[in-house]
Image (cartoon, helix red, strand yellow):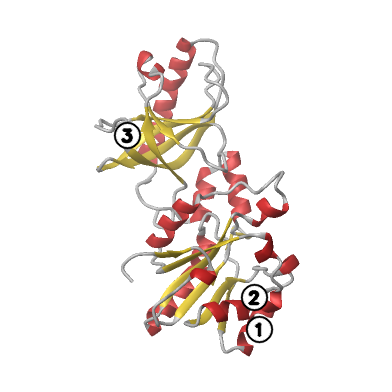
Amino acid sequence: MSRLLQTAGVEQTRLPGQPLHLAVGMFDGLHRGHQSVIGAARQAAAADGGLTGVLTFWPHPSALFRPESPTALLMTPAIKRSVLEGLGVDVLIEQEFTREFASLEAEAFVPWLRGHLPGLVALYVGENWRYGRNRRGDAAALSAQAQAVGLQVIIVPRLKELGEPVSSSRIRELLAAGEMEQANALLGYHYFSVGVVEQGRQLGRTIGFPTLNLAWEPDLKPRFGVYAVRVVGGGSPPLKAVANYGVRPTVGQGHRPLLEVHLLEPTTLTYGDQLTVDWLHFLRPETKFGDFEALRQQIEKDVVSARDFFSKKAVLESPKDA
């Protein structure tokens, strides 16, 4: 298939007659562990002329079971779709996670899939995946149930980094601490933001450091502070930059976090352009300064630190290639 086919749930999915190899999971962040599960499905689909499918869920189950403190997600559905398409996925099934779906017994899950996806030939899950009412189903149960109806199940071992499993929760902790290199190593790509440049108060221009302000409001907020970043957008090549993410306490802008990017290279990027910002390295925490002059002097130091980072590290490649 030439482009990603999206469907709003298993019961609404209508597919061509090719074999369907379906990876199943929440897949928040689409980190290296998730990629290994999806890659197994893609490899098998390529071997038999089938379709690579992903079944994922929205919202996160925590929104149903812990509405007062739901899990902060690494990705919006739109970003997840974009990354999945880049991974070579043919079919994306976005199953709404409702109370009715959550009450589906583990024993009924495979027959439910089989009944609505007649082309289904194999399921791909991580070894720690759980399913069904009260999460009673595990990978071993899934294998037994699938075998009974003629389906294959591929259980992909958990990927480990530095002796610990690669997981979305681990990446959330790293982002909250500003540990960008470690987070990117687990993701297998640079953590990134996508947003449209919006007009701000232009205070940066008054102290010699104009910024591009991005309309970006993530569910999971990285640590407030200053970062060395890479910017792509408006048809330009990747540009080195320094960015501040936070509430800007020195200028008293309130409590809405803002991502401000100061480019270290000439550009024609302007208001209305959509930018992708790759977060590469944490430089310092956000700080309240006594006046604008103290802020200006610190930004000068930040620019020097960012340039030093770029001079010492090859950052135009993905973490997998660097």
Q: Is residue 307 above or below residue 170?
A: above
Residue carrying label 1: 145
- For the residues bearing labels 1 and 2, Cβ distance under 8 angstroms: yes
Residue carrying label 3: 272
Residue 176 percent location from the top left of the image:
60, 40
Q: Quadrant of residue 276?
A: top left
Residue at 44% from the left image edge and 57% from the top image edge: 81
Tell me which numbered mark, 3 or 2, is placed earlier along the sequence: 2
CA separation in Å, label 1 and label 2:
9 Å
Residue carrying label 2: 109
Residue at 55% from the left image edge and 39% from the top image edge: 222
Residue 130 percent location from the top left of the image:
67, 68
Residue 212 percent location from the top left of the image:
37, 29
Tell me which numbered mark, 1 or 2, is placed earlier along the sequence: 2
Residue type beneath disc 2: Phe
Horizontal side of residue 63 vs 253, given as left or right: right
